[in-house]
Image (spheres, rainbow, N blue to C red):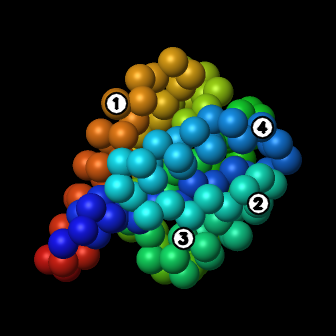
Amino acid sequence: MGIQEQRGSVLIGKLGLDGHDRGARLIARSLREDGFEVIYTGIRHTPEEVASAAVEGHVDVIGLSLLSGAHNELVPSVLKALRQAGGSDIPIIIGGIIPEEDISRLKNEGICEVFTPGTPLPTILDVFRKAAHEYRERKRSG
């Protein structure tokens, strides 16, 4: 089994009007170097586009970069779009400018993890590895 088969596949998405994608591109490149297959959507996509791409791409994890402050509106829309597309079980990891007071609410809504600026890259990669592994195990046994 090759490294990419072991690590799985990830979709990295940028939602809404936020055009800043340096962090998303860094994470996408780091995940590729770590052995993941990565789909990077680029900037300015709707929640429905991201959900559709994730389900059609059979990804194991979705990573969203949110810097615009619209996470309270966009994240529930992504979760709804995933439910409608048949991908509600795909874990979602968020990174970006997320106020501390919003993190627990996002996790209660079903977000796997939320990273803010300054989180060490090895920590982020570990969470993606674990989420992908657990998702594939659930699919195998379910």
Circle 2 sits on which residue? 45
Real-space Cα distance between discs 3 and 4? 21 Å
Q: Which residue is mark 4?
A: 20
N-terminal-most mark, 4 or 1: 4
Looking at the image, tell me whether mark 3 or mark 1 is earlier in sequence order: 3
Q: Earlier in the sequence, mark 2 or mark 3?
A: 2
**Foreground residue among 105 and 47:** 47
Q: Position of residue 2 (x, y in %)?
A: 24, 68
User: Answer yes or no: do the residues labelled 3 and 4 have beta carbons within 8 Å?
Assistant: no
Q: Is residue 11 left or right of residue 25?
A: left
* Residue 139 locus on image (x, y percent): 25, 75
Q: Which comes before the other along the chain, label 4 or label 2? A: 4
**Mark 1 residue element:** helix
Q: CA distance from mark 2 to mark 3?
A: 13 Å
* Sequence-first disc among 3 and 4: 4
Query: Where in the figure is residue 10, as x and y percent of width and height?
Result: 46, 60
Look at mark 1 in the image and give the residue it sits on.
Answer: 123
Residue on which the image places disc 3: 54
Q: Can you say which quadrant of the picture contains the C terminus?
A: bottom left
Q: Is residue 103 visible?
A: yes
Q: Is residue 135 visible?
A: no
Is residue 88 shown left or right of residue 40? Answer: left
- Amino acid, disc 4: His
Mark 4–mark 1 Cα distance, whole angstroms, equals 22 Å
What's the distance in space between the residues labelled 4 and 2, CA to CA? 13 Å
Mark 1 residue type: Thr
